[in-house]
Image (cartoon, helix red, strand yellow):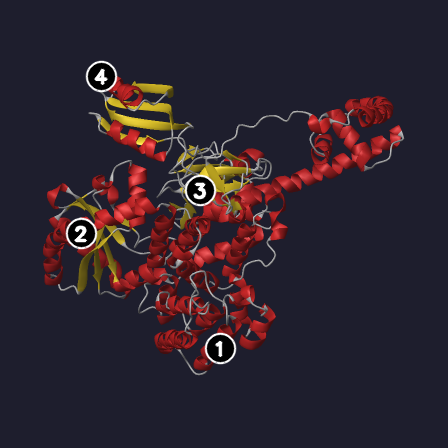
Amino acid sequence: MEVVIDLEAEKQEILKRYRKLRRTLTPYMKDGDAKLIQKAFKIAADAHSGTRRKSGEPYIYHPIAVAQIVVEEINLGPTAVAAALLHDVVEDTDWTVEDIQREFGERIAMIVEGVTKIQSPQKYDELGVSHQAENFRKMILTLSDDVRVILVKLADRLHNMRTLGSMDRHKQLKIASETIYIYAPLAHRLGLHKIKTELEDLYLKYQHPDTYREIAQKLEKTKKQRDKFIREFIAPLDKTIKENHFKARVFGRPKSIYSIWNKIQQQGVPFEGIYDLFAIRIIIDSVGENEKSDCWRVYSIVTDFYNPNPDRLRDWISTPRANGYESLHTTVMGQEGRWVEVQIRTRRMDEIAEMGYAAHWKYKEHGKNHVPKNRQESGLDIWLKTIRDLREQGEDLSATEFISAFRANFFREEVFVFTPKGDIKKLPVGATVIDFAFDIHSEVGIHCLGAKVNQKLVPLDYELHNSDQVEIITSKQAKPSIDWLKFAVTTKAKTKIKEYIRDEKRKFIEEGKTIVEKKYRQFGFEFNDTTNNQLRLFLGLKNLSDMFYNVGKGYINTKQLNKFDKWKHSKDQQDTQNRAQSQNNTQKVNGNNTNTANTPATKTPKVDTLIIGEDKNSQMKYTLAKCCNPIPGDDVFGFITINDGIKVHRTECPNAVELLSNYGYRVIKAVWQSQKDLLFLVGLKIIGSDRVGLVRDVTQVISSDMKVNIAAIDIGSTNTGIFQGKIKLYVYNQEHLDDLIEKLSQIEGVVTVSRTDDEKISLNQVLN
C-alpha cells in the first residue's frame, strides 16, 4: 500500500517547530542573532530538502530538535543553536566546511567541523583501524578549542537515542554502545546530569530491553509506597528547616533505571533488595561565602532527626568534583530501618549539577558576589586544560589507544592528595606516587627515587588515597625504566616515561648503527637492509631497532659480531642451493598434481542455528565467541574479525560495548533460528547458605528434574557458612537456561544463581 505524504502539512509542522525554537531562544538573543538563526534554518532546510529519516519523517526535524535541546536543556545561545541547525549539512549534503565559514564565520564552521564524521571511513578499515575511534578523537581534540563542539554533539546523540526505535536492531546496539562508552561519561564529566541520566536509561532500554521494562514496571508498582515514605521522611525536616529561617525546597526523586540496574549488577541482589531507590534533595537559597556554612547547618538539622552512616559522608563542597559538581551527601537511617541518601546544596550548586557547563559559566561571569573565591577556577577549567595537554601527549597514540587513555584519565573518579605545603592535587583513582611526581613537574617525575606519604617512606608503585600528604624524593641518578609503565596511571606520566625511554633508546640505537657499520667495513659487507636483517636473524632478535639497541648498550659484544662473518658466507651458499631445489620442486608440482581440486576438504561441522546478515537463506560461516559463549535465545550480534571470519557475541558480553562503540562498522546482524537438537555449554555460579544436603538438591534439580548434562562442577563452602558453586552444563537455549535458573533459585538456602561464562579478554584477541 502506497503511503500518501501531505507535503503542505509537513511544511507547516516544520515552521511550527522552528517558531518554537525561536521563542525558546529569544531571551538569549542580541542584535543580529535573529537573522543568523533564520539564515541557518533556511540553509539547513534547503540542504536537507527531500531527505527523510529512517522513521519516514522529514530530515529537517532532526537538526531543529537538536537545536531545541541545545537551547532548552543545555542553555546555550545563538552561536551553538546555528551550529546545531547546520551540524549535518557538511556530512550529508554538498556543503563544505569552507562554505559554512564563508556564510557564518570561523567559530560556527569550527563547531560544525568538530561534529562532522570522517567522510571516507573505508581507508581506516585496513588493519583493524577504527574510524569510529578516529571520529571520537577528532571530536575530543576539537573540544579543547571550544567545548560547544561536544555540547552540540551530545544534543545530537540525545535526539538520536530518543528516536532509536526506528533503527534496525544491530544499529541500535552499535549506537547504544557508543553512547554508554563515550557520550554518557562525557555528559557526566561536563556536569550535564539530566542528559547523562537519560542517555544511560536509553542505553539500557535498547541494549537490555527486557531488563529495562522489568525495572520500569516494578518502579511503577511501588510508586505509591515510595511517595508515602518520602512524605513521612521529609515532613519533620521541612518544618524544622523553615523554623531556622532557611528558604529551601525539600523533595524526593527516584533513582534512574540504569543506576538501579547498576546496583543490582554490582551488589548481586534482586530489585527488592535495593533500598535506596530514591534520594532526598534539599536546595537552599544561599549565595557567596555563606553557601558552605549554610549547607553544614542544614546537615546538622538532618542528623538531629536521623542517624547518619559515618562511612557515607561525601563533602563535595570543600573539594568539588572534576566536573564542577558541588554538594553535601549523607546516608541516614530512616523509618522502617531503611537507608536514605540526602543531598544538600544551594540553588547555584543545583543548577550547575543539573545543567553543567553552561550554568558554570553563567555564574562565573557574574563574579564574586555569586561564586565563592575558591570556585573561580573549577574542575571544568582544569579538565579542559588537561585535554589540551593530551592533544600534545597523545600524538604517538593510535585512535583506539587515544580513546582508551582519554577514558582512563578523564572518566575516573578522583582522589584528593596534598603537597608538603598543603596544596591540593586531584588525580584519578588508582594513581600512584609516580603519577603525583609527574603531575608536579616532568623533571620531578623523571628523577623520582621514592616518596614519603604521611611521613612514611613508600615505593613508587604506592597507590594514593584521599587526604594523603605526599613528598617526592628525587635523585639525579634516578631515571625512568620500562617497569614504571606497569603502575603509572595518568596519560602525562605514561607519555613522559615513554618519551624518556624512547629518547634513551634512540641514542643507543644510533651508537649501535655506528658500531655495526664499522664492523661491516672490516668484513667487506654493505650496510643495507639485506645484510642488517641477516645479522638480526643470526642474533635471534625480532627487529632491527632491538638489534642496534643491544649493540649500542654492549649486550652484543665484538666477538658475536666477528662470528657473523663466517655465518653469513655459509648462509649465502645455503640460500643458493635452496633456490635451485625450489625450482625443481615447482616443476614436479605443475606436472603431477593437476587434480588437487578433488582432494577432500576438511569437514566443518554444519551449525545453522543462526541467520547472519539480512538474507535469511544465506549460509555464512561463523563461530561462537569464547568470551561469552552465546546460546540460542540470547540477544546476539555478529562481528567480522580480521583472521577468523564472523564471531557471534552476546549483547551482554564484557567486550560488547567496546566492540560496538569503536568497531560498529564491522558488526553484522545475527538472529537465532529455532532448533532444539544442539547443546551449548554455559557456566552457572550458585551462592547460598550452607546446609546438609544442599549439594544433593542442586545436582538433583540439574540431572534428574531438568535432565541436564553436567560438564564440570566445583562446589564448596567457606568457614563462614557460605555455600559457593561453579557448574558447567549443557542447555538447548536461553529459555531452557532460564527454567533451570528458576528451579535452582527455589532450592532452600540458595540466594543467587547467575551466569558466569563471560570473560573480558584482550581486545586484540577479539578483533582478530
Q: Residue at x 79, y 22 (%)?
A: 559
Of marks 2 and 3, the one in the foreground: 3
Looking at the image, residue 328 sits to the left or right of residue 23; the answer is: left
Label 4, secondary structure: give it.
loop
Q: Residue at x 41, y 72 (%)?
A: 77
Check disc 1 and report the residue beneath it.
42
Q: Residue at x 59, y 54 (%)?
A: 121
Check disc 3 and report the residue beneath it.
671
On the image, which quarter does residue 709 sit in?
Answer: top left
Looking at the image, residue 705 sits to the left or right of residue 42; the answer is: left
Check disc 4 and report the residue beneath it.
693
Q: Are circles 1 and 3 on residues that touch, CB within 8 Å?
A: no
> Of 200 and 450, which appears nearest the observer?
200
Q: Tell me, for residue 223, which label it has, or none.
A: 2
Residue 322: image location, x then y, percent:
39, 53
> In the displayed image of the protein, which residue is found farthest to the right?
524
